[in-house]
Amino acid sequence: MSSNHETKTLSSSTEGRGSSFNSSFKSRSLDSRPSVENDKASIQNQSIHHSSHFHEMQDAPNMGVVLEARGLGKTYQDGQIKVEVLKDVDLTLAAGELIAVIGASGIGKSTLLHLLGGLDKYTAGEVRIQGHEWKLQTEVQRCHLRNEKVGFVYQLHHLLPEFNVLENVCMPLLIAGEKLPAAAEKATEILEKVGLAHRLRHRIGELSGGERQRTAIARALVKRPACVLADEPTGNLDQYTAEKVYELFVELNRTYKTSLIMVTHDMRLAERLEKVYHIVDKKLERQR
Ligand SMILES: Nc1ncnc2c1ncn2[C@@H]1O[C@H](COP(=O)(O)OP(=O)(O)OP(=O)(O)O)[C@@H](O)[C@H]1O
Ligand SMILES: [Mg+2]
């Protein structure tokens, strides 16, 4: 994963559980995370909320296809050592389609999601999200596209510990320039759907593992993105909780007609989705 440390200015609360976004802006240093919060600073700093030109630069998007990878490859280079993780990966994700990607640890599942979601740069081939090729975007345009089109649920939830549940879920909307009252309303609505209406003011550290994962799911879906990329969204939960969170997650994607690519180790969960792919010999193969 590419990562960078930056000092970011976020509208933050300093008071604890009952706090709101109305408190003063404060400068904070956040650790590097491949998530929406990192996008926020880049977007705000460059004031592009209402001036993105990415759509004008691209071919007309085929709305029936959400994500398309052709000849996709990734080789990591650490000094003299090259590690080829993926090669010649082809994938088409249709609107509303739910697919699973399985494979052994270290095989390249997270790498694939990061490439598809524009979080990392591929070294071969191309990936288009609703017709927009990641490689052709500037860094600012990539941030904007990610915020608009993609919801991520990370292997570790990557929620912001200094913000409460509601604030975390509001974040993608605020990044996109929505006003706080409208953002809070939408965030509350989805948090109700994931059963967290009674935890809106809790800090992330005050939640159970399942509640954190449900918060992360709410954050990924709050903007109704074209697709959700989920990296073992239930991997750190006990079987019972994993099952419940998984059911909820799939049901919400189906309700919203969001396309989903879910990485999982759990074949039982994978089999409930429309298609199952696995990564073998650096390539993506359809299993079912
Ligand atoms: N920045 C990097 N530099 C070099 N190698 C990397 C880098 N990131 C990942 N890799 C290597 O790429 C391979 C694939 O990693 P990846 O995280 O995609 O695996 P994964 O299938 O998601 O594994 P897991 O199931 O354990 O999460 C691994 O061998 C890993 O060591
Ligand atoms: Mg992984």
Image (spheres, rainbow, N blue to C red):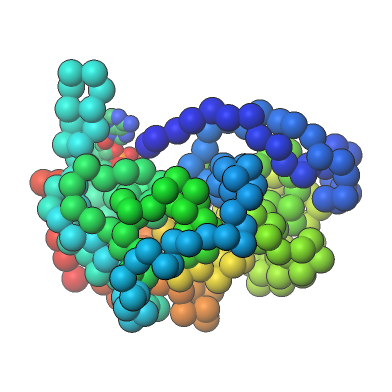
Q: Quadrant of residue 259?
A: bottom left
Q: Is residue 286 visible?
A: yes
Q: Quadrant of residue 199?
A: bottom right
User: Which residue sits at x=52%, y=38%?
Assistant: 33
User: Which residue sits at x=88%, y=44%?
Assistant: 23
Relative image position of residue 4 (x, y in whole percent)? 49, 30
Q: Kindly give the residue lying farthest to the top in the view shown.
A: 80
Q: Quadrant of residue 211?
A: bottom right
Q: Along the line of sight, which residue is nearer the eye, 277 or 152?
A: 152
Q: Along the line of sight, which residue is nearer the eye, 84 or 142?
A: 142
Give the quadrant of the C terminus: bottom left
User: Is 202 located above or below residue 66 in the figure?
Assistant: above
Q: Tell me if 7 is positioned left or right of 11 in this view.
A: left
Q: Tell me if 68 is positioned left or right of 176 in this view.
A: left
User: Is 266 located above or below residue 32 in the figure?
Assistant: below
Q: Tell me if 247 is positioned left or right of 197 in this view.
A: left
What is the number of callouts on the image? 0
Give the quadrant of the N terminus: top left
User: Which residue sits at x=44%, y=61%?
Assistant: 54
Q: Along the line of sight, which residue is nearer the eye, 285 or 79?
A: 79
Q: Is residue 249 visible?
A: no
Relative image position of residue 255 (x, y in whole percent)? 52, 81
Relative image position of residue 17 (x, y in whole percent)? 84, 45
Relative image position of residue 266 (x, y in whole percent)? 34, 56
User: Which residue sits at x=17%, y=27%?
Assistant: 82
